[in-house]
Image (cartoon, grey):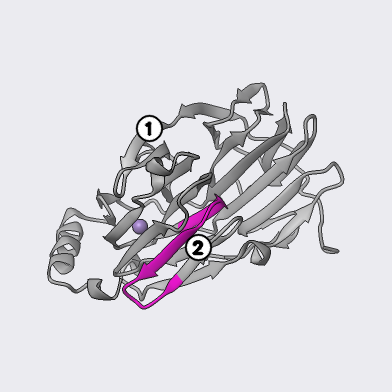
Amino acid sequence: MSNVTSDRVQQERTVERIITGQAVSDGAGVKINRVLTQNLQRRLDPFLMLDNFGSDQASDYLAGFPSHPHRGFETVTYMLEGRMRHRDSSGNEGLLTNGGVQWMTTGRGVIHSEMPEQEEGMMSGFQLWLNLPAKDKMRDPWYRDFNGDEVPVFSTENGARVKVIAGSSHGVDGAVQREVTEPIYIDVDLPAGASFSQALPEGHNAFIFAYRGAVRVGDKDVASGKMAILANTAGADGVNVHATDASRFILVAGKPLNEPIAQYGPFVMNTQAEVFAAVEDFRAGKLGEESVI
Ligand code: MN
């Protein structure tokens, strides 16, 4: 790409805290490393959850995520390896493959299934939950699949290869842009010894998750499988990440909503009453036709 500019960072953010994920089981028993858990929703507002799934054991993922509902937020699924079939109650269907991204705005409600379409080999990727502002929680659902080659990619002079899923990096706009929360979501492949800088708005909450090799931010090491919450240092304009080994990491940032968060499983609203209404609507069949999935 010709329009790559460099993100110069004058004052860098530091690491506030290193987080070790929790091993959880979700869907029909899929084994997951849950990196962003409910107790971090306030600190990492507008993000509600980050799951890292990754296994070469079919028994860990084969049962998938059969029919289940959502209301009130967005799900962003980024597939690194493997194939996952998606169907929803709005009639959407898509096959998510290597490097592909599925962005779904659940709005007032969808019922969907996310099922592996392979019986052996490695399946890995991420699912990130991005909250919607109160005014958008009951909007119409929206959905889009991006194949791996539809996600913008650029390389830097020192060999970083960067996929821009959302927001922008080094002047390159990502696949998805969102008002209100202005999310930035990039996947960086960094050779050993190289560094990468990303500009970040001062008020954004931000974290990185290393999933291959290890990286260093300031004087803190971030090992593979760990999340580093970046400090909201006053006056900081970005972050510098150094690859200790050949590394891959995702960097996620967004503008906090500062609204109340009420969650019951797959429903995330602002009040308990709204959550009860979501459960009632689901039971009454108002979130969609399950028979089409
Ligand atoms: Mn789901």
Between residue 92 and residue 175, name the one nearer to us. 92
Is-magenta flag for residue 79? yes
* Amino acid type indicated by mark 2: Gln
Q: Residue at x 39, y 61 (%)?
A: 132
Is-magenta flag for residue 90? yes
Q: 10 Å neighbourhood of mark 2: few (<14), some, or many (≥20)? A: many
Q: Report x, y in % for residue 271.
A: 21, 55
Q: Residue at x 65, y 67 (%)?
A: 150
Q: Point out which mark residue 81 bears.
A: none
Q: Report x, y in % for residue 159.
A: 82, 43
Question: Under tag 2, what secondary structure?
Answer: strand
The quadrant of the rendered image in which ligand 1 is seen is: bottom left
Between residue 210 and residue 274, name the one nearer to us. 210
Q: Quadrant of residue 41?
A: top left
Between residue 79 and residue 57, name the one nearer to us. 57
Chain part drawn in magenta: 76-93
Q: Which residue is mark 2?
A: 102
Question: Under tag 1, what secondary structure?
Answer: strand
Q: Earlier in the sequence, mark 2 or mark 1?
A: 1
Q: Report x, y in % for residue 115.
A: 39, 58
Q: Report x, y in % for residue 276.
A: 14, 59
Classify 47 as above or below 11. below
Between residue 24 and residue 1, name the one nearer to us. 24
Q: Is residue 42 visible to the viewer in this orientation of the structure?
A: no
Q: Which residue is mark 1?
A: 23
What secondary structure do most residues of the magenta stretch adopt? strand
Q: Residue at x 44, y 65 (%)?
A: 104
Classify 248 as above or below 179. above
The C terminus, quarter of image: bottom left
* Amino acid type indicated by mark 1: Ala
Disc 2 to disc 1, C-alpha distance: 24 Å
